[in-house]
Image (cartoon, rainbow, N blue to C red):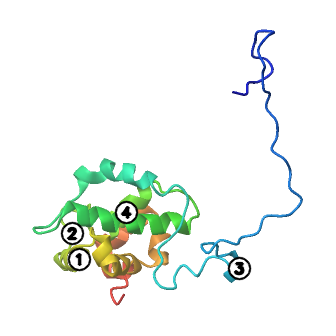
Amino acid sequence: MAAPEYVPTKPTDKVRRYTSPPRYGSEWHAVRPGELVSQGGQPDVDAGRMGAPGPDQGYLLKLVTLLRTELQLADGELLADAEAGGVAIALKRASLFGRAPVIHDLRVAYTVWGLLDPKAPAELVAERTGRFEGIRLTAHHYRELRAVVDAVPASTLRLSPEQVTDAVASDWRSLLDLHS
């Protein structure tokens, strides 16, 4: 096994040292079928409801557990559905800012749909209950999950958590595009 030069060895050992791999003269080109470089790069994110790519998105799954006890679910709502919708919306918000997700992204996502308010308006709860049903099963309900995310416009997601809380209290419909 190769070892750095400063590692002591016996004089009789045949030691191999680190070496750089040989340099090849030609440049690398994307030739695999999965490479999108030759087709103009990544498709438009909004085309075909492809989601919201961003860095370190898996970190949000750790953050979900921090707000789990604060969720206010109505009768018939499942925790997994609420979390699936919240995560997808939070990832969209984080990607709008070009960064990894933080707890405030998830807080905004939950607040928009009244999931953190024990006295959320009945109409909002009814709207949420119908839209969130089954979205935890993304293999079968991906379109429904994307519809939940698309119902929250970018202008809403750019608001601070405090602004979203205030807006939900005054007019929650102004934060959502329910025609999505």
Q: Of discs 4 and 3, which sits in the foreground?
A: 3
Secondary structure found at label 1: helix
Q: How many badges with numbers are in the image?
A: 4
Residue lying farthest bottom? 179
Label 3–label 2 contact, CB within 8 A: no
113 left or right of 41? left
Along the line of sight, the residue nearer the viewer: 49 or 161: 49
Q: Quadrant of residue 31?
A: bottom right
Q: Amino acid at mark 3?
A: Ser
Residue matched to label 2: 120
Give the secondary structure at mark 4: helix
In space, the residues marked 3 and 2 are separated at their CA atoms by 49 Å
**Which residue is nearer to you in this view: 35 or 24?**
24
The image position of residue 4, as x and y in percent, is 76, 24
N-terminal of the two: label 1 or label 4?
4
Packing grade of label 4 (10 A; few <14, some 14-19, many >=20) is many
Question: Where is 103 relative to 138, above or below?
Answer: above
- Type of amino acid at the residue the image marks with label 2: Ala
Q: Are marks 1 and 2 in contact (CB under 8 Å)?
A: yes
* Disc 2 element: loop
Question: Residue 130's x, y, as percent?
Answer: 20, 79
> Residue visible at 40% across and 80% down?
150
